[in-house]
Amino acid sequence: MTSEPSSPPSFSTGRRFGAGFNVFVSAVAALAVLVMVNYLSARHYHRFQWANGAQPPLSPLTLRLLHSLTNDVKVVVFFDTDPESSLYQLVAGSLSEYQSASPHIVVETIDSQTDPTGAKRLQARYPLIGQKDKDLIVFEWNGRVKVVRASELSDYDTSKLISGQSKEVPRTAFRGEMLFSSALAGLLDPNVPKAYFLQGHAEHDPDNTEQSGYSEFAALLKEKNIVFEKLIFSGAQGVPADCGLLVIAAPEKPFSPAELQRVDEYLEQGGRLLLLAGYVTYSTGHITRSGLERVLAKWGVALGNNVVVDLNKQNQVAAGKEDLIEVREFSAHPIVSPLARTSILLAGARSVAKLGAGRSGPDAAKVEALALTSSQGATRSEFSTGVPRADSALDYEGAIPVAVAVEKGKVQGVTAEHGATRMVVVGDAEFLSNYLIDQEGNRDFASLAVNWLLDRSPQFAEIGPRAIKEFTLVVSVGQMRLLQGILLVGFPGAVMACGLIVWLRRRH
């Protein structure tokens, strides 16, 4: 019995070695190509915007600014980094574009909710950041600091809220690039803006750290890279030429005619004024006037000799204190549109409204209400008893404005840095005192008002806010169940069915 010869191997030893060597060389070559492609792509790349109809990631103005950087700018994002936070995603995405455009933008992120150690480190490095502060971006360059707060970053659509059609206030635009580029330009600009606090009429003191002082508001100016000094009119001295912002907070003593003329001349030359009317002081049954009422009337603003109350109990803060009110109604002005979801707390506010018989014509100042009481607001003008009471001849009810913005276009023949006159007049000064500035949206209002008044980088206004497109999918309960069935059962079942068919075919 003879055995059948064994079949020769399919591949000889040499062929197997050659095949293995070819595979090894191919793998090494593929790895080398991958490394070279990554090396080249890291140094030579181009970014494309795939979204249909989207705006360019960064404007040419911002790109020129970023390309001019020669030293690192540190950007600290102190935010709630919850993935569901749409605002944080917008901030992170925008700053990612800045980093891609310039290697000198160094971003650090600290979660304001889950990183208390990082928060303490931030507050130790930047003393201007308080323990209650959150959701902000700090820009630092060469020892100078600029802070952008979350309340400044969005535009909202308040039309449906005002009309009563909806209680929701949707975010319509993101102002990140405009504010971030403005912050960078402000840091790089050697000319630091200066604010002057007028003194000499018992105004609030920016150095006073007591409850009635204004040291917290002065600190807010510092975080915006604004220096400040005190100003006292003496002799023929007027408002200094380097004044970028004049702050008059709660004057209790009357101005002399010469002092009023100096304030008016400053405004006529394109000045910027933040006027905060003081809590009323009673003298022989009437409110003591400072005289600034006459200057405001010239610009179309009526500052009432009264106290505003709100009879809507939802806006009353404490029982027995009618004049301590929450103001929740805001206009669409850029100063207050970001405050649509919050309120400001006022104490003893006076009415501030557009004067019906003010200037008219193309050269007239534009006066726009910023904040109003509810429709149940009322004024109190009778003080003979020492307590504000209604006067049937003077007082009225309704939605009463307590703050206005005033703007007049560029003054012809004036070469001042400002160019256009801007004012914010609020019927209360206590709301920015150390005691109340951190209540509700008071600090945010102050920050937004200062931004608008100074408008230090008007060239970045052309960037404009970036519109946010929202899509709403409305489905019924039955349609939602059908979608859940397709996602949870249909798709996995289809994959399993394909696998079963392949298995059955291979068996046969």
Image (spheres, rainbow, N blue to C red):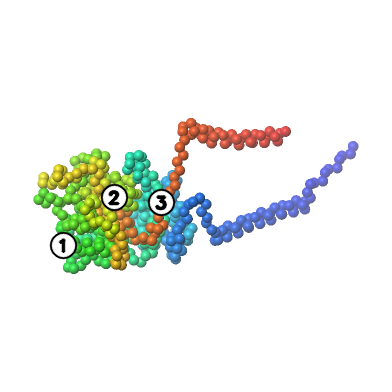
Tell me the crowding category of disc 1: few under 14, some 14 to 19, or many 20 or more residues within 10 angstroms, Cα based: few
Seen in the picture, residue 497 relative to 367 is either above or below; the reply is above
Seen in the picture, residue 267 relative to 491 is either above or below; the reply is below
- SS type, badge 3: strand
Q: Amino acid at mark 2?
A: Leu
The disc label shown at residue 257, or none: 1
**Circle nearer the N terminus (3, 2):** 3
- Quarter of the figure with the N terminus: top right
- Residue wearing tag 3: 174
**Does the image show residue 439?**
no
Along the viewing direction, whichever of 391 and 299 lies nearer the viewer: 299
Residue 178 location, x and y as percent?
Answer: 40, 56
> Which of the 4 image quadrants contains residue 27?
bottom right
Along the viewing direction, whichever of 495 and 59 lies nearer the viewer: 59
**Circle nearer the N terminus (3, 1):** 3
| Labels 3, 2: front one | 2
Q: Is residue 232 left or right of residue 342?
A: left
- Residue wearing tag 2: 370
Residue 381 location, x and y as percent?
Answer: 15, 47
**Circle nearer the N terminus (1, 2):** 1
Furthest residue in direction bottom, as rendered? 236
Q: Residue at x 41, y 57 (%)?
A: 463
Q: CA distance from mark 3 to mark 1?
A: 46 Å
- SS type, badge 1: helix
- Quarter of the figure with the C terminus: top right
Tell me the crowding category of disc 3: few under 14, some 14 to 19, or many 20 or more residues within 10 angstroms, Cα based: many
